[in-house]
Amino acid sequence: MVPELSFKDLNVYYPEEKHPEFGGFSGMEFDPSDKKWYLVTDGRPPLRTSYLYRFNSSASGFPDWTQPDSIFTFADLEGAESIRITADRRKWIIASEGDDDEKFATGDIHTADFTTRKLLSSHEIITRYPPNRGLEAIAIDGQNTIWTMSEWPSYADKDFIRIRGVKMGADTVIRSYSYPIDVASCLHADKEPGVSLGNGVSEMVMENDRVFWAVERCFDGNITRIKLKRMRFPITNTTVIQQVELLDEFDLNTIIEDIPDNIEGAVFGPILPDGNPSLCLIADDNFSRFKNGKQKSVFIVLRIEFNN
């Protein structure tokens, strides 16, 4: 895995006076059928809505950041964290994270019309997670199964994240797996994981029906450590929750200089000229330009060379 290219701060393309709504991207999707890129911002109505940006591909095959093709809104959507297109290109599947009076986080799956962006349905898929640690990751496989991962384990699960598979159009979980995680893995003994500190999963993307990639980010108050993990679902017919298998692990801090601290979106992009697939990441700046300006909206392209 090696970096191909990187745009260090997308805010330069969206000055505040022309794009007051822009505050970083929390999810990303690529549609290879028409070479369009879609990126979503989170939102907290009525303070701000979730926006969907559509970009054409540049000559390189990656987003033409100089001018969004379109900017839409999901006016009634709170806290969009991840977005995917269904295979028939008729619907959006969106994961959102909400906080209940800042006591615990939740997770919801939303379906929206691809063209009108009108919300068609919403249902709660996970509940009772520590504040700001709810549903962050969503993916769709070739069997139209929607997979979800929260950022942290639930209060009930403790030391693993429950991966849930929901059939398209259904509200019930059909399969579950466990993803082991240590939420304090990068912290010194004198620090406690919480709303900002600690390790968690911020996105997942399907390579095929059994293999997926997860983005882990671990912030210790000074530096964020980003890991990409390539995982495989076990073959099983049992109802017992089984642990996913680790195939590969990559430490981005050893691959990319000045790694951004808030990678929230991931998607497989176009095939590179050498025939290898690209994995694209986006970092959310959390409306940093309206705060201290320290976080950046960064787009990263990685070349993937598979070993197995």
Image (cartoon, rainbow, N blue to C red):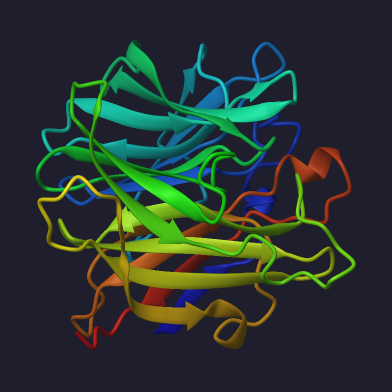
From the viewer's perspective, tell me whether residue 56 is left or right of residue 27. left
Question: Residue 3: x and y, percent?
Answer: 47, 81
Task: Please tell me whether residue 13 is drawn above or below residue 191 in the rendered image.
Answer: above
Which residue is nearer to you in this view: 127 or 219?
127
In the rendered image, which quarter is residue 219 located in? bottom right
In the rendered image, which quarter is residue 104 located in? top right
Question: Residue 158: x and y, percent?
Answer: 57, 50
Which residue is depicted at the point 78% across and 66% down?
A: 220
Which residue is nearer to you in this view: 267 or 103?
103
Task: Please tell me whether residue 268 is drawn above or below residue 56 in the rendered image.
Answer: below
Which residue is nearer to you in this view: 200 or 110?
200
Which residue is nearer to you in this view: 20 or 107?
107
Q: Quadrant of the C terminus?
A: bottom left
Q: How many marks?
A: 0
Which residue is depicted at the point 63% across and 43% down?
A: 24
Q: Quadrant of the N terminus?
A: bottom left
Instruction: Note whether residue 81 is visible.
Output: yes
Task: Please tell me whether residue 66 is drawn above or below residue 53 in the rendered image.
Answer: below
Question: Residue 83: x and y, percent?
Answer: 39, 38
Question: Residue 66: x and y, percent?
Answer: 52, 50
Task: Please tell me whether residue 75 is drawn above or below residue 80 in the rendered image.
Answer: above
Which residue is depicted at the point 71% across and 43% down?
A: 286
From the viewer's perspective, tell me whether residue 257 is left or right of residue 136. right
